[in-house]
Image (cartoon, grey):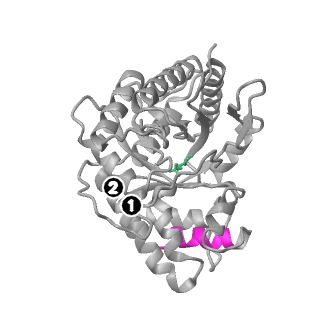
Amino acid sequence: MAQYLSADKEKELVQTANLLMAKGKGLLAADESTGSMTKRLQSIGLENNEENRRVYRQTLFTGSKDLAQHISGVILFHETLYQNDDNGKPFRQILQEKGIIPGIKVDKGLVLLAGTNGENTTQGIDGLGERCAQYYKDGARFAKWRCALKIGDGLPSELGIRETANVLARYASICQQNGLVPIVEPEILPEGDHDLETCQRVTEKVLAATYKALSEHHIFLEGTLLKPNMVTAGFDCKKKYTAKDIARATVTALQRTVPVAVPGICFLSGGQSEEDASINLNAINQYQGKKPWALTFSYGRALQASVLSTWAGKSENVSSAQEQLIKRAQANGAAAKGEYGGGAGGKAGDQSLFEANRTY
Ligand code: 13P
């Protein structure tokens, strides 16, 4: 007899997914792996060590409880899930007390797909069931797994797309069996000079393959979330597009590929400036057309750039850094309702956050 999720498990997954996608709220991605924190901390002259990572995350999580008006969940890295604030209180408890759901990155990073032109898959399936069970016990209620595909001559390849779709489906299945809502993230990277139409075509191909694989793996779609790239031109594309163009291309690609059963779509910021990420999300929500899912944010760089540069590693800057986080969260919360008027400012508001070949 085929084994499916119990009705209770399904109910819990739906509840979590809906809480995460509550109107006007989105996610803070603070799950940069230990290695990828080097760039962040070096940019403000700090060494990448455990204590500096802890103090930085403490700055993110310990500000005003108003954060929960716009942030429904925070994605954590393994180390952070088990770290405490200066008084010994676990970060996960600090978040829960604010009404913010802790989530966990469960992939173990990108590895080369041999025989391809520099394409990757994502590792971390071995032992994933045990890890998810433990994370659930320790308070996590959702998970993230990131795959990354490149656009280029013959890229992404059929193999790259198939492997991405399958590993995301396998991960989603394991998460759901352990009570975690899987965020499915097939990121199409913005490097290159491709135009908007090319990104749209590739995004459609990848999302269609992803949902085919999720169906084959019997994934309970009502208990999943999608974290895609917005459809944008490559960073080196000469032609410039408006937020309206991006919104049309993005919503069209989603309409063609993402089932109505999926409760929400939370975009990554993908190297856009903080302000562009807010403006484009707003345009997506203002776009007139069928949009049967919540359309919101799950930003890393576009929620943290101003916080990081304002904090600069100094305790006297903690509260102004925390204000920056609230400001950007507020802007994105408004954008998720199509009500952002622009101009939230911020120390790094207009700065491009693009990094080539980014790992996470
Ligand atoms: P960015 O918003 O910085 O692109 O990252 C979000 C994320 O979680 C990527 O996996």
Q: Work out which residue is located at the far front of the displayed protein and give it.
A: 238
Which region of the structure is painted magenta? Answer: 52-63
The amino acid type, in three-letter code, at marker 2 is Gly
331 lies left or right of 298? left
Residue at the spot x=37%, y=33% of the render? 250
Residue at coordinates 35% horizontally, 31% vertically from top-left? 249
The residue tagged 2 is 333
Report the magenta stretch's main SS: helix
Secondary structure of the residue carrying numbered label 2: helix
* Distance (Cα) linking label 2 and label 1: 6 Å
- Which residue is at 74% across, 29% downward? 113
Q: Is the CB of mark 1 within 8 Å of ligand 1?
A: no
Q: Amino acid at mark 1?
A: Ala
Q: Give the structural element (helix, strand or loop) at label 1.
A: helix
Using the image as rendered, state which of residue 264 and residue 42 is in the foreground: 42
In the image, residue 278 sits, relative to residue 84, either above or below, namely above
**Number of numbered discs:** 2
Asked if residue 13 is positioned above or below residue 141 in the image, the reply reads above
Q: Quadrant of the N terminus?
A: top right
Q: Position of residue 14 (x, y in %)?
A: 44, 37
State the mark number for residue 329: 1
Q: Quadrant of residue 38?
A: bottom right
CB atoms at circles 2 and 1 under 8 Å apart? yes
From the viewer's side, name the closer residue of 141 and 256. Answer: 256
Residue 50 on the magenta span: no
